[in-house]
Image: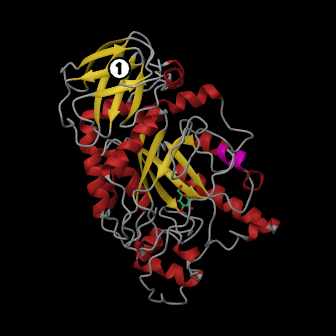
Amino acid sequence: MQAIGLGTSLMPLSAQVLNAPPPPPTGPEPKGPTTSTPADRERRLKWWREARFGMFIHWGLYSVYGRHEWVMENEGIPVAEYEQTAKRFNPEPNAARAWAQLAKRAGMKYMVMTTKHHEGFCHFDSKLTNYTAMTACGRDLVREYVDAARAEGMRVGFYYSLMDWHHPDGALCATDEAARRRFVDYIHGQVRELCTNYGKIDILWYDVSWPLKPDGWESVKMNTMVRQLQPDILINNRAGIPEDFTTPEQRIQASVEPWESCMTMNDSWGYQRADDNWKTPKNIVRNLIRCTRDNGNYLLNIGPKPDGTIPLESVNILTEVGRWMDTHAELIHAPVDVCKVKRGQFSDFIVRGNKLYIMVQFWPGNEVSIGGLKPQALSAKLYGTSTPVKFEQKDFRLRLTGLPATPHDPMVSVIEVEFDAPPEQDNIGVRRNRTRRMVGI
Ligand code: GLC
């Protein structure tokens, strides 16, 4: 049993603003063994691919400091001082219910909550340490989260950090075999607790495998155990072996399939009071569209305050995103085809079968044109309406005309065009084959 030290009292800390640390280099994707077969993986991934959009929740003792989830490390706070914060951690009842309601409002389908971040504090009722919410406030906050997520119809994910700045063996394990044995038993034991005590869990989201390699973590053994306990679970790649999906961080880039981009709404995962670098709702919708276009998932973070309430800015952003999702969710949640239309200076694109969805972000006015589209357009309409859009297709240009002067949705308006074959775009063809002229008018 790992004990909370009760020595030093918490020093008041200045409200200094930290720059967010750059995202860690997400180097080459892990290679090596996995603990399931491709067919089984596809079966388990089915709901996740359609879900597309999830809520990440970073919440811990760092939220009390309000200076980013790396505050303990980046400010060099001694362990004995930091852990005193647990005494002040007493969130409002059922805080997680508001998270789940907001996730649903935003059109999200799943949630992933930090059960233990790098600081080592456990939101769940672990029998392997008393550095837990049970000791701090007499509550199992993972249980509350799981119940809240289920009540709103959300799939349930657990984030779990392998790196641990609190456990005495958390760094020693790299150089001392007895420490490694103790620490790996502790980690496997906690993963077992998480996979045993909370019913069906949909996602296990490991993070930071410092300072061991997969062999040292015994990742294959750990994930084999996880799959025995949770046969339908999805496991990410951050225990150093490939498993079910890759995790590009703070960037959207079609990565090794299947992939999920995790991103913050400002520059911090954990609550950072002074971080005002908020993305706009439109940025978020555009990011979601880019993920959808390339068949990835988007895991968007909130950093609740220590009492569990969500920063107002995040509530406002997600409510606006939800307003857009009210009329566009079907475009986001249904499977997509590879998008071979990429170039448009005012829009992004989504392709399904013979249909092209022109996702107009900067409404150009009465006319929208796209160059280089190969198949023949058959019909066009404003998405979600039966209003037909006039069009003409000649040489290299598809012109959609007679459109309203202002967008029908202030964030992203969609025009749906049906072709006689899956839409493709050939920009080089336009450049190469367009008739050029020696003289002008
Ligand atoms: C990084 C950070 C961590 C955050 C995670 C989310 O690994 O260290 O604070 O939880 O990214 O992907």
Taking depth in this image into account, of 39 and 278 the one nearest to the observer is 278
Write down the residue under mark 1: 398
- Going by the image, does 324 lie left or right of 86? left
- Going by the image, does 32 lie left or right of 309? right
Is 224 colored magenta in this rendering? no
Say if 179 sits above or below 102 in the image: below
Say if 324 sits above or below 127 in the image: above
Quick check: can you spot residue 387?
Answer: yes
Secondary element under disc 1, as helix, strand or loop, is strand
On the image, the x and y values in percent for residue 202 come to 49, 42
Say if 347 sits above or below 275 in the image: above
On the image, the x and y values in percent for residue 381 come to 24, 21
Q: Amino acid at mark 1?
A: Leu
Screen quadrant of the N terminus: bottom right
Report which quarter residue 277 is drawn in: bottom left
Taking depth in this image into account, of 325 and 374 the one nearest to the observer is 374
Q: Residue at x 40, y 30 (%)?
A: 349
